[in-house]
Amino acid sequence: MVKNIAVIRGDGIGPEIVEQALHVLDRVAALYGHTFNYTDVDMGGCAIDKYGDPLPESELKKCIESDSVLLGAVGGNKWNDVPGHMRPEKGLLRLRAGMGVYSNNRPAKIWKQLADASPLKKEIVDKGIDFIIVRELIGGIYFGEHKTEGDVATDVLTYSEAEIERIGRIGFETAQKRNKKLCSVEKSNVLDSSRLWKKVMHRLADEYPDVELSDMLVDNCAMQIVKNPAQFDVIVTENMFGDILSDEASMITGSIGMIPSSSLGATTCGLYEPIHGSAPDIAGQDKANPIGTILSAAMMLRFSFDMRDEADAIENAVSAYLDAGYRTADIMSEGESLVGCRRCGELIVENLRKG
Ligand code: IPM
Ligand code: MG
């Protein structure tokens, strides 16, 4: 198959982690006889420097016209003082909205090789950590009006029934493919938008009788994720709660550097990115963990291109690399071999086998 992939290297560690993911994709293409064409897209701080805009229309267009988008990370201290509407992150938000990718899937799964890297007690980790956060990605407070007038700042949080319903359905369908448990997370004891969220989820539940729906307040959920993560199968939640809970969930699996994500809307053109940021403090030092991006590339093959064997091959190569005891600094512990970003990518490429 021939696929056109828009590649956003971005800022900070973005370029180095994306480079390794492209080496892995090239190896997959060679093994399975595919052609992956890459189109570079500027977004984030580098686009501000070049065009004075974190995502010019022409760059967004390249993404919308691609078969899918692979993204490293954007942002950094250098652009901290630019006005809110011009920040690097604004490029990312515009990209998500422009592509219409309302459904963000963030797996929190512990690799058996990394059980020691989890900050949780062994008896909690041993019960298993394997759940998915389905996060609404293009609504809520991120996309409401933002304004500062004098000494008052306002951010508006709005959800319509239709917006809740379409992400709710993804939550139920994701649960149907797994252990059929869906936990809807909101703050219905305080927020109107959350009361509407809960109402819509319960209305949908009638259409998915095989899925067991539960409700949880977001503050309790933050606690339950560290107390008893084994209780979760699929969590569905709104944009900002999903942002916060997915960082927490990634940490209990050992490192935020390992977690990929997929974002999809009405078409198969998806956005694939690790959930971590641009880590400017270690940028350019060959220290970053490229696995979150490499696994995001695997998700692209699986969900957008229907290349399941190829995606399995990447995941197996990552597993073989971890089995051999190699670790980047973020997941390093005693007795293992420290490698840099580039070597990590090379070793994963060497471990790729056609399944
Ligand atoms: C994420 C990030 C982004 C978000 C930032 C960079 C805008 O934290 O993908 O989780 O808040 O969605
Ligand atoms: Mg985040």
Image (spheres, rainbow, N blue to C red):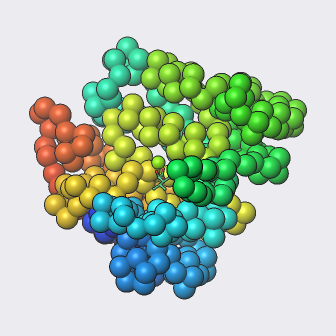
Farthest residue, direction front: 150
State the residue at coordinates (52%, 50%): 151
> On the picture, is 272 further left or further right than 341?
right
In the image: residue 337, left or right of residue 19: left
**Quarter location, residue 138:** bottom right
Between 194 and 84, which is closer to the camera in this rendering? Answer: 84
Above or below, 255 against 28 in this view is above
Which of the 4 quarters of the picture holds residue 13?
bottom left
- When the figure is inspected, residue 215 is found, relative to residue 174, above or below; the finding is above
- In-image side of 113 versus 67 (left or right): left
| Quadrant location of the C terminus in the rendered image | bottom left
State the count of labels. 0
Please state the horizontal and vertical placement of residue 81, each as a whole percent of the image.
36, 64
The correct choice, above or below, for 301 with respect to 36 in the image is: above
Residue 235 appears in the rendering: yes
Image quarter in which the N terminus is found: bottom right
Q: Is residue 12 left or right of residue 198?
A: left
Whether residue 35 is visible here, answered yes or no, is no
Give residue 38's quadrant in the image: bottom left
Task: Please state the horizontal and vertical placement of residue 10, each as a whole percent of the image.
Answer: 37, 69
Residue at 67% x, 65% y: name it: 100
Residue 148, image x, y percentages: 56, 56
Residue drawn at point x = 52 percent, y = 67 percent: 85
- Looking at this view, is 215 or 49 the one in front? 49
Residue 74: image x %, image y %? 39, 63
Residue at 30% x, 46% y is 320
